[in-house]
Each structure stands twice: as C-alpha cells, then as structure tokens.
Image: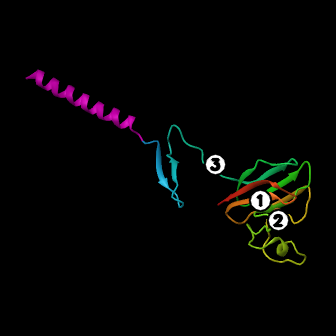
Amino acid sequence: MNNTWIWIVVAIVVIGGGYWWLQGSQAPTAVDAVDDAGVQQTMPVIGSTTPEAIVEAALSATVTYDGSSYSPASVTIKQGGSVTFTSTAGDMWVASAPHPEHTGYSGTSRSEHCAAGYTGAAPFDQCIAGTTYTFTFNKVGTWKYHNHSNSSAFGSVTVVQ
Ligand SMILES: [Cu+2]
C-alpha cells in the first residue's frame, strides 16, 4: 500500500517536471508578421534572449562622386531627409532618371523644371554642374539618378517612411 503512494508521487513529479521543461525549451523568441507590402517581418519579443535591433533609416546620407562613379551607389534615408552629393573630381550634375529628360522624381522635364522662373515642386535635379548638391526627399520610393555630365555614372536613393 505504501509503495503504491510512493510511485504515484514519483509519477506526478516526473510528468510535472517534464511539462515544465518542455514549456521552457519552447519559449517563443520571435513573432512573425506580414507588413503592408506583404513582406514577412520578424518582430522581437520583449525579454527574448536574442532581440533583433530595429534599425531606422537615417535622416541624411552623403554620396561622393570621384569622376567616374558614385559611392555608395545606393543609400537609404527617411522621408524628409536629405542626401548631399559631393564631387571630388570632374563635373557633377546630379539628376533624376531617365537621362536626358529627368522626369523620374518630379514628373516635370529638365526643360521645364530647370528653366528660369519655374515655381513647381522641387525637382531632384541639380540643373547645373557643380561640386556639391543637397536635395531633400519628401517622396517615398526608390529614386534613380545619374550624372547628367557623365550619364554612365548612376545610383539610387531609397526613401522610406
Ligand atoms: Cu541626364
């Protein structure tokens, strides 16, 4: 009779301990979600032992033109942020794609938005060769650009919310 009770207690301890061990080993470390674009996102769970950093895009970026190419060729900034392009060699005329119309960002052509007296929305177009050009991006998207003075040099600016 006493042996039966001992075995019941042992069984309860083993089953309970096993359940506790399984719960601990299966603790969630991340929650999956799908964003507006349908892209799978992994969100960190508070208290996770391996949290993923949430990296937010910077409000500004710098790009250097060395006479033949832009570096880095692609940058990402936050909406309302700006990119400063600087030439260390050669003529630089930063302009929105496509060459030679430059309609990509503003929807207006170079002959319109670079003309004296233009008063529309700011075009992503330097409109004249120079050594430095800073443009503020208020539109979300990926905006390709090139050097109008050397159209084989190009890159892109991705603007995120
Ligand atoms: Cu061009």
Q: Report the front residue among 83 and 29.
A: 83
Q: Residue at x 52, y 58 (%)?
A: 35
* Range covered by the magenta-colored residues: 1-27
User: For the N terminus, which image quadrant?
Assistant: top left
Q: Position of residue 58 (x, y in %)?
A: 71, 52
Dominant SS of magenta comes to helix
Q: Position of residue 129 (x, y in %)?
A: 91, 60
Q: Residue at x 38, y 38 (%)?
A: 26
For this view, does 111 lie left or right of residue 97?
A: right
- Local secondary structure at mark 2: loop
- Local secondary structure at mark 1: strand
Q: Residue at x 60, y 44 (%)?
A: 53
Q: Report, in whole angstroms, how far the alpha carbon at label 1 lies from the one at label 2.
A: 9 Å
Snapshot quadrant of residue 19: top left
Q: Residue at x 91, y 48 (%)?
A: 89
- Residue type (three-letter) at the residue carrying disc 2: Asp
In reply to whether residue 2 is colored magenta, the answer given is: yes
Q: Which mark sits nearer the N-terminus, 3 or 2?
A: 3
Name the quarter showing ligand 1: bottom right
Q: Label 1: which residue?
A: 145
Residue farthest toward the left in the current orientation of the protein: 1
Q: Label 2: which residue?
A: 125
Residue contact between numbered discs 1 and 3, judged by CB atoms under 8 Å: no
- Residue type (three-letter) at the residue carrying disc 1: Tyr
Q: Which mark sits nearer the N-terminus, 1 or 2?
A: 2
Q: Label 3: which residue?
A: 55
In reply to whether residue 7 is colored magenta, the answer given is: yes
For this view, does 70 lie left or right of residue 15?
A: right
